[in-house]
């Protein structure tokens, strides 16, 4: 479904230095690693928000890097994107924010009644009460609720691919765990292909089919959560041990 081919990107310094990675249809991949190692940059190349200096990204065999503007818009219609800060529109209520996730052309075909049904379903899927939250503005919601509304907006258009950029950043452990469970639930329910960029190693291991560790702009590890936990690579061990200690401390 998604293939990264030798992705390079430099800003003031090299960020990605030759990342090649394939994500099969229906898989949930967690991308972890130190801050500044290119996780979010790699995610943004998936739909052309950032263009790599070298390499290509293929979605179902179609090039993102070399796509025309029209083809790129067509590709983006197949993808839902969950931004780190939820990126809700302050002047829109929850219903309007979620409905915004339905492409204009599709919205015209659906009509108001079907759009409402889809918004209600999306909110229920992220464990929010539609009747209570739809009239509210983002400022009236907690941080965890805003994250869920952002997730509802990403899934309301029924995408084939979901991209999550640090979905639990800024949340307390309880709300972070709840969002991680929702990501896994949505992946299992819809069989959508998902990539989750996260600093929450333990949460990523619980929700993912495979884990990729980026370090120094390169792929340091790719494998199952079990393989990550049992790895003898010193950097992988440091991440796994640190996160296990943090999780244990949070439960005390």
Image: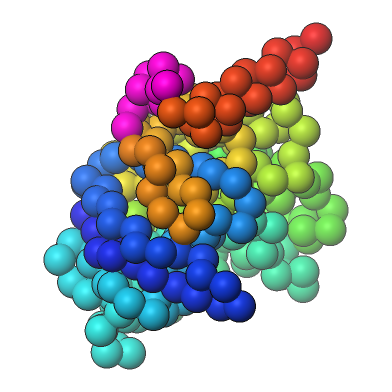
Q: In which quarter of the image is the N terminus?
A: bottom left
In the picture provided, is 16 more to the left or to the right than 181? left
66 or 94: nearer the viewer: 66
Magenta-drawn stretch contains 228: yes
Q: How many marks?
A: 0
**Residue range (magenta):** 223-232
The residue sitting at the top extreme is 252
- Residue at 34% across, 63% down: 18
Furthest toward the front, the residue is: 234
Q: Residue at horizontal 34%, vertical 38%?
A: 222
Q: Position of residue 32 (x, y in %)?
A: 51, 42
- Where does the C terminus fall, quadrant-wise? top right
Q: Where is residue 66 in the image (x, y as percent from the top left)?
A: 25, 84
Answer left or right for 140 relative to 113: right
Q: In this view, does 63 lie to the left or right of 247?
A: left
Name the main secondary structure of what is drawn in magenta.
helix
Quadrant of the rendered image containing residue 77: bottom left
Q: Furthest residue to the left?
A: 61
What's the image's color scheme?
rainbow
Instruction: Report x, y in % for residue 2.
Output: 26, 57
Q: Position of residue 65 (x, y in %)?
A: 30, 79
């Amino acid at each position: 479904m998604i293939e990264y081919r030798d992705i390079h990107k430099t800003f003031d310094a090299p960020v990605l230095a030759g990342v090649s990675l394939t994500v099969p249809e229906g898989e949930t991949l967690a991308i972890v690693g130190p801050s500044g190692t290119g996780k979010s940059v790699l995610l943004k190349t998936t739909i052309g928000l950032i263009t790599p200096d070298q390499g290509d990204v293929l979605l179902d065999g179609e090039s993102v890097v070399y796509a025309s503007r029209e083809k790129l818009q067509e590709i983006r219609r197949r993808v839902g994107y969950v931004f780190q800060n939820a990126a809700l529109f302050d002047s829109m209520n929850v219903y309007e924010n979620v409905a915004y996730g339905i492409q204009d052309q599709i919205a015209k075909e659906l009509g108001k009644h079907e759009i409402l049904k889809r918004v209600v379903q999306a909110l229920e899927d992220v464990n929010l009460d539609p009747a209570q939250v739809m009239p509210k503005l983002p400022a009236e919601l907690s941080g965890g609720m805003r994250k869920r509304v952002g997730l509802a907006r990403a899934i309301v258009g029924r995408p084939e691919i979901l991209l999550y950029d640090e979905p639990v950043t800024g949340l307390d452990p309880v709300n972070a765990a709840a969002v991680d469970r929702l990501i896994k639930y949505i992946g299992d329910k819809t069989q959508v292909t998902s990539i989750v960029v996260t600093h929450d190693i333990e949460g990523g291991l619980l929700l993912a089919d495979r884990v990729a560790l980026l370090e120094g702009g390169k792929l340091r590890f790719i494998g199952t959560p079990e393989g990550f936990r049992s790895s003898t690579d010193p950097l992988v061990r440091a991440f796994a041990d640190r996160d296990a200690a943090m999780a244990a401390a949070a439960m005390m």
